Image (spheres, grey):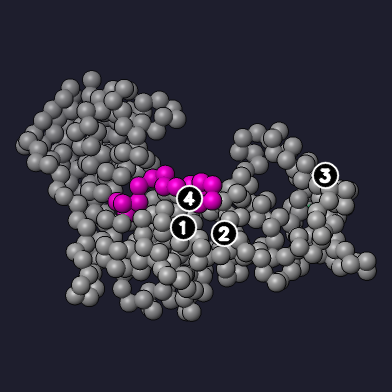
Amino acid sequence: MPLKEENFPDILELMRQAAEKRVEAPPGGHRVPGLWRTLESFAETNPPAAVLASWRHYAGEEYGTVGNFLRATARSAQWYPCLSAAGCGNPHDVVALEDGRWLARSQEDQRYCPAIWLTEPELAIHELDVERLGVELCRALGLTSARASQAVTSAPKAWRVGTFTATQSPVYLALCPSEGQLLLNLESLMTGCGEPFILLAPTARYRSELIGTMLHRERCAFLPLAPCLAPDGAGFRLTSPVRPILDRFAAGCVPHGPTAPEPVINPKPAARPEAGSRGRLRWENDFADIWLGDERYDLRERTKARLCIQYLYDACAFDQRSARHFEKQIDPYVRKHSKLEPLPNYAETKLHHYFNPSRGKLAKLGRELIRSAGRGTGRYFLNVE
Ligand SMILES: [Zn+2]
């Protein structure tokens, strides 16, 4: 039956109200979770599933992309999302009426949370087509997609989606609603897989320190998708380089089988002179020793801080105009060349983290030497004058 506006005044009016509310809301006030968080939120089932209204509501503007990877199931929802901006926010119970229609009723005060009339198609649960999503993710990330994505029997929230060609290593996609679930599925993968692998996940929010240690110990790579891929029409586009993570993985994992190609190793940085200086900054031993004025800093154990300063120096970033972008330029360089460091939490790295702890001597160096090119620019330079 075609959806006619006059048949469903309640739901359309509510949607209109919700849309108006969103326009009026201050930025950040009513933020929708977006596509990546939605995939995690709906991952209580395998694969993630919900009614279309929920997918739309949670994914917001990014529904245009995620909708492309959904398929209808024969199952019907027992509850329906609250669509009223001023409503209860809780799921409404779905009740069948004698005339064949359906009603989603709030448990709360119905003056603020009117019941929603529904048709059977609107109650159909739509699940994520992980196979199609896997193919698109591999395309966007430059990985080889698996011929058919397969759920792993022992790890029900993980799917084999592809292969990293350079080392012939498996690539898995984990869709987990909690840290506990990610841990369980990861343990099963590690037991069953028997070789280093790359784990994709929508975000890094459930990658705890414990999980990070496990991944590091097993020489596995963790690649959160939200910082590197943006929804773009029917698919995704790369917004941040993933090569540093993949290169580091290749350098750390031993290729299996006699025909496996050599892992990709980065060339060594070009030879540089023994020492140098500019303004009040002086350095020796490849930036392992730094002087700012009369104060000396030993950066032998602080690879990231050292690489950051060295990069800005080599790039002649000494003023606002020549400042370099942290996420696009500085951090990828530091990552690429600091292979000895443990895997960082990619989603949350900030330049000052290189100089932590914040009350330490190194933080003072960071504050005095590294300047922002202006709020919101994301660019930094060496203040040597
Ligand atoms: Zn409600």
Q: For numbered disc 2, what is the local secondary structure?
A: helix
User: Is residue 104 visible to the viewer in this orientation of the structure?
Assistant: no
**Mark 4 lies on residue:** 236
Q: Is 79 a magenta residue?
A: no
Single out the residue that lies furthest toward the top. Answer: 385
Mark 3 Cα-neighbour bin, 10 Å: few <14, some 14–19, many ≥20: few
Residue wearing tag 2:
69
Mark-to-mark CA distance, 3 and 1: 36 Å
Quadrant in which the C terminus appears: top left
User: Label 3, on which residue?
Assistant: 13
User: Whole-percent x and y of residue 341?
Assistant: 26, 54
Whole-Å distance between the Cαs marked 4 and 2? Answer: 12 Å
**Three-letter code, disc 3:** Glu
Residue 316 x/y as whole percent: 21, 28
Q: Which residue lies at the image location 88% right of the left edge and 48% below the top edge? A: 6
Mark 1 and mark 2 in contact? Answer it, CB < 8 Å. yes
Callout 3–callout 1 Cβ contact below 8 Å: no
Instruction: Specify which label sits upstream in the sequence, 4 or 2.
Output: 2
Q: Would the CB of label 2 be found within 8 Å of ligand 1?
A: no
Q: Within 10 Å of the Cα at label 4, are there few (<14), some (14-19), or many (20+) other Cα atoms?
A: some
Q: Which residue is mark 1?
A: 136
